[in-house]
Amino acid sequence: MIDDVLLTELSGKIIIFVDEIDSILRIKFKDDFFAFIRACYNQRADNPEYQRLTFCLLGVATPSNLIADTNRTPFNIGKAVELTGFQLNEIDALIRGFEGRVARPKAIMEELLKWTGGQPFLTQKLCQLICSSNYSFLEHQEKQCIEELVQNQIIENWKAQDEPEHLRTIRDRLTQNAENQTGRLLGLYQQILHQGEIPADDSPEQMQLRLTGLIVKQQGKLQIYNRIYAEIFNQAWLDKVLTNIRPYAQMLNAWVNSNFQDESRLLRGQTLQDARNWAADKGLSDLDRRFLDASQELEKRDVQKRLQAEAEASKILAEANEVLFLANQKAKRRIQIGGGALAIALITAIVAAIWANMMIQDTQRERIKSLSISSTALLNSNQELDALVAALKAAIQLTSATSVDANTKESVRLAIEKIK
């Protein structure tokens, strides 16, 4: 076909444009297609006619996306052409389209480019809106007029007003990445959103983010392409998307807002494990990795502290057991010594009690014996007294019967009274 038709029927240089090249990703024979392009290039060595043939591939894709077999790739013999946005000195034709519609066409275009950054589609769409709108673009009020038009016709309710589709395509490229790099792309975009710009290093992640159309490389820096994108894909939008894909988005944002100092926002235990399981098959951003690594480090420190506390507790317990053992041994010795002394004391008390009882019994026996002797003596005395009384009574009777002087009788009577 190339030899018989294309190179034969056409003279001069031939350029074949293949637009929306990223759509070929869904075609099964895509590797063969690019291998064919490479074969045409290789034919230049044998057939000079192929020098006239050039292919121009247009679209949003990286070479690695387009062909898996690096041995057959045509891109090592190709040349990348980076497209930039419109500059004011490049769009005189568009400026002339405002003549007769606005007071100062160039001033309008200058304000328009401040919002679009020269992005071709948005620039042309705004030009069309200006020409078809009922706004009065008064002289020296171009800034306010363009801002009002952009806010009302593009930014507000942007999903419904995105016709033809443009902003939704950028959103889908960012959030529905075919290589499961959404987390990394969003994290990288978040850095740019926070810092305004970051150094460009042409890493695969940066290239993927640039291919979304949201980010542009300028003077060695990556930055958001224009104000319209920045207004729509702002922090609130990003937080919402991240919340949908990250189970720990709220904690991460709080940690970032604390300047990475609030460790209470880091993940622990099962929550950390769940987050790592979720992140295992996802391309995470540097911020995500930093957050999870910090959480892991905190978890490790907590485990070390627990182990250290357990070791110290075990040491204290061992020391306490040793002290208790020694105290127990000492107490046993004291009990043994005390038990011997107690036994001696008991024996001594028993002996003393027995001795005291014996003394009491001896005393009682002595008392009983004394009482017995006393009773016998008393009995004998009583008997003697009774005999004496009887003798006295006999004497009285005798004195009564005989003539005894009165004094003698009286003495006898008194003696008997005393004895009684």
Image: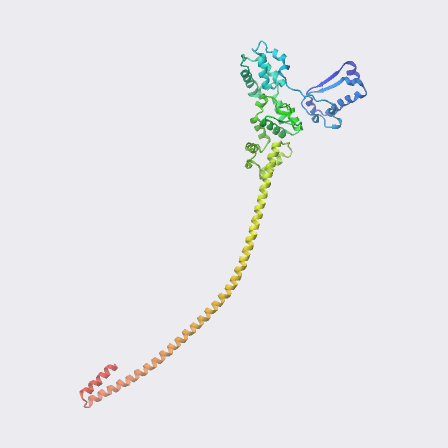
Residue 27 quadrant: top right
Residue 390 quadrant: bottom left
| 249 relative to 338, above or below | above
Viewport quadrant of the N terminus: top right
Q: Residue furthest top?
A: 100
Q: Residue furthest bottom?
A: 402
User: Is there any visible trace of residue 340 in the rendered image?
Assistant: yes
Left or right of 399 on screen, residue 161: right
Residue drawn at x 36%, y 80% is 373
Q: Position of residue 38 (x, y in %)?
A: 76, 23
- Please state the total of marks drawn on the protein image: 0
| 352 relative to 28, above or below | below
Q: How is the image coloured?
A: rainbow
* Most foreground residue, 341 or 72: 341
Residue drawn at x 55%, y 54% is 321
Residue drawn at x 34%, y 80% is 374
Q: Residue furthest right?
A: 46
Q: Position of residue 352 (x, y in %)?
A: 45, 71
Residue drawn at x 58%, y 46% is 308
Residue 305 quadrant: top right
Viewport quadrant of the C terminus: bottom left
Q: Position of residue 212 (x, y in %)?
A: 64, 24
Q: Position of residue 22 (x, y in %)?
A: 68, 23
Left or right of 38 on screen, residue 138: left
User: Is there any visible trace of residue 1 in the rendered image?
Assistant: no
